[in-house]
Image (cartoon, rainbow, N blue to C red):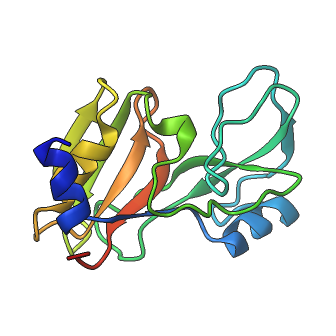
């Protein structure tokens, strides 16, 4: 086992966080989002759009609801709102927090690292399938509070990654 793998198990354990169930439920049952955008289910004509609640890419024929969301809780210039999808007919929240979601492991992705003030501190563009390793490297910096996994092509928020307490 390589040094990076030993490092992962010795020092860094990730916590992958999907949007809260309450937020997904509100998007499914509301006529509009917090920004006043009308909400309605869209049948997917092809596979690919990811649900931010179950962290799975939708299949053709599934219904998704698109709404505007900010993954930040602090008011600052980095607090952006952007489009995200949830399965319109419900889904289970992602329940394997110590593993990257299968639909995102080998795909190109952008990891944005934020400090405690929720300001961008570093960015990693991952195109070689080394998302787990790059996330662990970013989280090994004590100045990094959390990461956002972002769409490589559109820049949209996918999910949050935090560091778990050291597993020594």
Which residue appears farthest toward the front when viewing the image? Answer: 1
Residue under the point 79% across and 52% down? 38
The residue drawn where x is 20% and y is 44% is: 123
Viewed as shown, does residue 143 lie left or right of 31? left
User: Is 48 situated above or below 164?
Assistant: above
Residue 152, picture quadrant: top left
Whether residue 108 sits left or right of residue 62 in the image: it is left
Please indicate, yes or no, whether residue 138 appears anywhere in the rendered image: no
Question: On the rendered image, what quadrant is the C terminus found in?
Answer: bottom left
Q: Residue furthest top?
A: 46
- Taking 17 as reference, is 142 left or right? left
Q: Position of residue 158 (x, y in %)?
A: 50, 48
Mark count: 0
- Residue at 28 percent across and 31 percent down: it is 126
Q: Is residue 123 visible?
A: yes
In the displayed structure, would residue 27 be above or below residue 100?
A: below
Which residue is found at the position 11% from the left and 46% from the top?
A: 3
Q: Quadrant of residue 6?
A: bottom left
Of residues 19 and 35, which is closer to you in this image? 19
Task: From the viewer's side, name the closer residue of 90 and 4.
Answer: 4
Q: Quadrant of the N terminus?
A: top left
């Amino acid at each position: 086992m390589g040094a990076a793998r030993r490092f992962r198990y010795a020092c860094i354990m990730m916590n992958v966080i999907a949007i809260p169930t309450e937020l997904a439920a509100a998007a499914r049952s509301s006529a509009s989002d917090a920004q006043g955008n009308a909400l309605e289910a869209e049948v997917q004509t092809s596979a690919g759009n990811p649900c931010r609640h179950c962290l799975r890419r939708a299949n053709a024929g599934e219904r998704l609801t698109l709404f505007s969301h900010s993954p930040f809780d602090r008011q600052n210039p980095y607090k952006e709102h952007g489009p995200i999808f949830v399965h319109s007919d419900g889904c289970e929240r992602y329940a394997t927090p110590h593993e990257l979601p299968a639909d995102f492991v080998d795909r190109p992705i952008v990891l944005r690292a934020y400090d405690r003030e929720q300001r961008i501190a570093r960015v990693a563009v991952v195109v070689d399938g080394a998302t787990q390793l790059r996330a662990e490297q970013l989280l090994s910096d004590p100045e990094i509070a959390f990461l956002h996994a972002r769409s490589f092509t559109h820049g949209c928020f996918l999910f949050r990654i935090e560091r778990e307490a050291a597993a020594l």
